[in-house]
Amino acid sequence: MIGTDIRNRGDLVELVNEIGFLPFFSGRIEGFSLEENVSYEAWYQGRWKGRVHWDAWDWKGEVLQNRELVYGKFFEKKAGFISLELWPDFCNYRRDGYDFDARFDDGLASYKDKGVVDFVTDSGALLTREIKDALNYKKGGNKGFETVITRLQMETYVVPANFEYSVRKNGDEYGWGNCRYDIAERFWGDKLCRSAYKRDPEESLERIIKHIRKVLPKMEEDEVRAVLRG
């Protein structure tokens, strides 16, 4: 579908800024993902001692810390990247005119959702394990944390802010990284998250579709809509 060869973070940032958004893993639209367009070396080469060399699995943390792209579970409950240009329209469309408190007041958000949003709002950006420990998501306690945190990302209220790794005694980092979550407005700013609020949510959807189909005209509109619906 895209027909490019993503070799490094710079290639990824350039591509997403051009097309608007990109899922991380292969999915509904064949050829439309980082996984299907990344170079073999960047996907499979692994990491060097001390993380001197980072591969595609680490780019998500880098683009967040450099404020280059938005990353999170945005596409059919799976991860992907969104350009800063289109992020306001994603927020406007996915929130459907609701800030989180209004969504909760209208009975459209659960108490578990509110618990996570309130805790992260009050405490600042938190690691997954910190949220789970504080809100009793453990054996014999609350269940469904991944469902809650994924839903809040899909609705654009909570976003990943970084990925932090365990450290061995010699200083080497290892593992897949523990996600640190934050409220979208605090991490990306009120202006960026809310600047499309003046538009109807459906208008924002059409703007997103028009943007990507201008760059990738062969992409089926129905498939794009399905991915964006979540």
Image: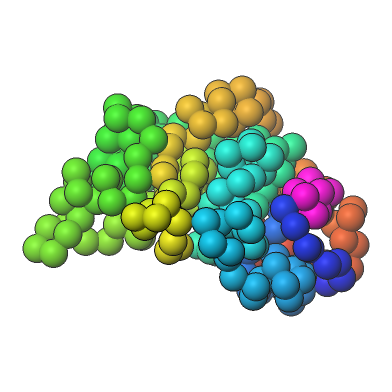
The foreground one among 120 and 37 is 37
Give the residue displayed 80% in from the left and 54% down from the top.
11
Say which quarter of the image contains residue 224: bottom right
Where residue 185 appears, as percent x and y from the top left, is 51, 29
State left or right for residue 46 relative to residue 109: right
Where residue 106 appears, as percent x and y from the top left, is 35, 37
Extreme-top residue of the structure: 191
Relative to 36, does residue 159 appear above or below in the rendering? above
Look at the image and say whether residue 113 sits in the magenta stretch.
Answer: no
Relative to 53, does residue 70 appear above or below in the rendering? above
Extreme-left residue of the structure: 140
State left or right for residue 70 relative to residue 180: right
> How would you classify the magenta stretch by its main secondary structure?
helix
Give the residue displayed 36% in from the left and 30% down from the top.
124
Report whether residue 222 is seen: no
Number of numbered callouts drawn: 0
Quarter of the figure with the N terminus: bottom right
Where residue 125 appears, as percent x and y from the top left, is 39, 35
Where residue 177 appears, as percent x and y from the top left, is 44, 56
Say which quarter of the image contains residue 104: top left
Relative to 183, does residue 59 appear above or below in the rendering? below
Look at the image and say whether residue 12 sits in the magenta stretch.
Answer: yes
The residue segment tinted magenta is 10-19
Report whether residue 53 is seen: yes
State left or right for residue 152 relative to residue 33: left
Say which quarter of the image contains residue 63: top right
Quarter of the figure with the C terminus: bottom right
